[in-house]
Amino acid sequence: MADPVSSFDVSRREFLEGTGAVALAAVAAVPALGADELPSVPHTAIQVTINGVKQKIDVEDRWTMVEMLRDGLGLTGTKIGCDRGECGACTVLLDGKPVYSCSNLAVWADGRSIQTVEGLAKGDKLDPLQQAFIDHDAPQCGFCTAGQLMSAKALLNNNPHPTADEVRAAMTGNICRCSNYNRYVEAVMSVSGARA
């Protein structure tokens, strides 16, 4: 009985070159589409209040909230860290509740209110929470800071005098790669008038 491997006398290089030629021929056989022939992406006009300002925005149905904020509106304070709802860098307040804007579609915000980190300061005057972050040297690299601020803001809006454990619990969804958690907790506690 013949050895099946030795009877198949093709080198790896010959095999790859042959499959490459077949793949190239297959691609060349597909006609190129002109710009007017490309399939259109569905759009929806939504009305949303962003940082206190009502806006009508035309969004692609596939856009996430963070894409609408950053790419559509230029609000780049909201960061994209993991793009899968794990790190919290993209946290914004949706109707006062902290959400990962990378995990929510923009169309879901229709008729709702979004607050981003840009909405905390009033002109040149920082929000007391922002000032506390600075005073307690909370931001290190700064990448997670916007998300940390928004989670802390949601907590303080609902509970002006939280305990240190409540602060930690409210901010567990925000990962700080610099591991500066104690300073974030101290900053939030200082705004509440308590000591960490």
Image: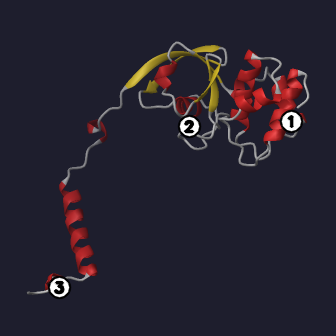
Three-letter amino acid code at the position of disc 2: Gly
Count neighbours of disc 3 (C-alpha within 10 A) and say few if under 14, some if 14 to 19, many if 20 or more: few
Disc 1 element: helix
- Compare residues 40 and 142 and report the one nearer the observer: 142
Q: Quadrant of residue 123?
A: top right
Q: Amino acid at mark 1?
A: Ile
Name the residue carrying label 1. Answer: 134
Query: How many marks can you see?
Result: 3
Q: CA distance from mark 1 to mark 2?
A: 26 Å
Of tags 1 and 3, the one toward the viewer is 3
Residue shown at the point (20%, 50%) measured from the top left: 31
Q: Is residue 80 above or below residue 193?
A: below
The answer to whether residue 190 is seen in the rendering is yes
Q: Is residue 166 left or right of residue 106?
A: right
Mark 1, mark 2: which one is toward the viewer?
A: 2
The residue sitting at 25% across, 69% down in the picture is 20
Residue at the spot 14% in from the left edge and 86% down from the top edge:
3
Quadrant position of the N terminus in the picture: bottom left
Label 2 sits on a secondary structure element that is loop
| Number of other residues with Cα within 10 Å of mark 2, as a class: few under 14, some 14 to 19, many 20 or more | some
Report which residue position mark 3 lands on. 9
Picture quadrant of residue 21: bottom left
In 3D space, how far apart are the residues under numbered discs 1 and 3 (Cα atoms)?
A: 70 Å
Nearer to the camera, 63 or 189: 189
Q: Earlier in the sequence, mark 1 or mark 3?
A: 3
Above or below, 87 against 194 in this view is: below
Identified by mark 3, the residue type is: Asp
Q: How far across and how far down the image is residue 184, in percent? A: 81, 36
Mark 3 touches mark 2? (CB < 8 Å):
no
**Of residues 165 and 89, which is closer to you in this image?**
165
Quadrant where the C terminus is found in the figure = top right
